[in-house]
Amino acid sequence: MAIIFQATASAPVNIAVIKYWGKRDTKLILPTNSSLSVTLDQDHLKSTTTSRADPSFEKDRLWLNGKEEEIKAGGRTATCIKEMKRLRKVEVEDKDPSAPTISKYPVHISSYNNFPTAAGLASSAAGFAALVSSLGALYALPVSPSTLSLIARQGSGSACRSLYGGYVAWEMGSSPTGEDSIAVQVAPQSHWPDIHALICVVSDDKKGTSSTSGMQRTVETSRLLEHRVAVVVPERMRDISAAIKARDFDTFARITMQDSNQFHAVALDTDPPIFYMNDVSKSIVAMITEYNRVAMEKTGKRKAAYTYDAGPNAVIYVKKENVKEVADMILYYFPDVKENFKDVFHLYSSQEM
Ligand code: 2P0
């Protein structure tokens, strides 16, 4: 009987607290600044991908949520598959002559998300991380997640951070060829397990400006971005990493909100300007600001942090002890949401509430 070469792997969504926005190399996907994210719990929002290599396959093929997608020559998916085959050859087949030469076989890849792609969540991050992880398992690659992150990065920049759980930095690196632009784990989830992410889906419309084209327009036109990448982000990367290590929620929350605000400020500073947040997003900012003002009056410390990506949906980081209070507050101040809870405004938690 023939051996079957097949493997399945999953990767969760990550939500950045220091935002990636801008490339210095668009082909290799090298960023203009480092970024840092929290990887959500595996059980809630993830992509699961199965890859199979077989000499009888005619070509590489890909299915997303059951629908076949074209693998464009020279495109991001093709690059990831090509790089993974190259690693199989170099790391396994060239070193061990008895290893099956499956890098020569075409692959079939099937990927599912356990969350609606239309929900405006970073599906490409989980998707490319799961694709690279499943090929890594298929090819039995003896390499670290950081090495796999180099390849996931070439699928979608933010995908490299989903190769690790917990608190993850994408170090921008300085090499023009990108070998030092990798993900590293700042701390595992077990270091600070009581941080939850409440994902509030304000709108599941497809976003107006894609991240890929939006960020390049920002690089080309925003003077504010120059200051952000040279001065602000390096400082924040240091300070938020220290806050995570010290489990200092107040500092973590302050920097997270400041960085979300600055990311949206550079989007607005782009010519023509890009708006990702809508009026509901802004009302949620006001609500969390007031919630923190009261908390700071009482204890001197913030209790929640909002952050927004390239769309209107809010992610609210909150400590476990305050999850219920914040979830109840959202439902209280956004009563329309109650009627339409399923379609308009979903709350996900990174762990059971
Ligand atoms: C982030 N975003 O750090 C930031 C915050 C959106 C806002 O990473 O062109 O989909 O595929 O590298 O990774 C969105 O950018 O862009 C993103 P590409 P990607 O999470």
Image (cartoon, grey):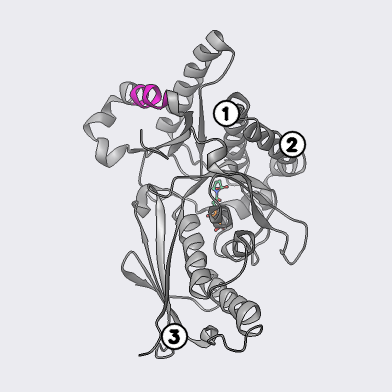
Residue 327 falls inside the magenta stretch? yes
The main secondary structure of the magenta stretch is helix
Disc 2 Cβ-to-ligand 1 distance below 8 Å: no
Q: SS of the residue at dot 1?
A: helix
- Say what amino acid the circle numbered 1 marks: Ala
State the mark number for residue 235.
Answer: 2
How far is the residue under mark 1 from the one under mark 3?
48 Å
How far is the residue under mark 2 from the one under mark 3?
47 Å
Q: SS of the residue at dot 3?
A: loop
Quadrant where the C terminus sits is top left
Q: Quadrant of residue 216?
A: bottom right
First of labels 2, 3 by sequence position: 3
- Say what amino acid the circle numbered 2 marks: Glu
Residue of label 1: 253
Pointer 3 local density, CA inside 10 Å: few below 14, some 14–19, many at least 20: few
- From this view, report whether residue 243 is shown above or below residue 303: below
Residue of label 3: 59
Q: SS of the residue at dot 2?
A: helix
Residue 25 spot, x, y in % from top left: 69, 62
Q: Nearer the viewer, residue 191 or 263?
A: 191
State the mark number for residue 160.
Answer: none
Residue appearing at x 44%, y 32% in the figure? 281
- Say what amino acid the circle numbered 3 marks: Lys
Pointer 1 local density, CA inside 10 Å: few below 14, some 14–19, many at least 20: many
The stretch of residues the image draws in magenta is 322-330
Quadrant where the N terminus sits is bottom left
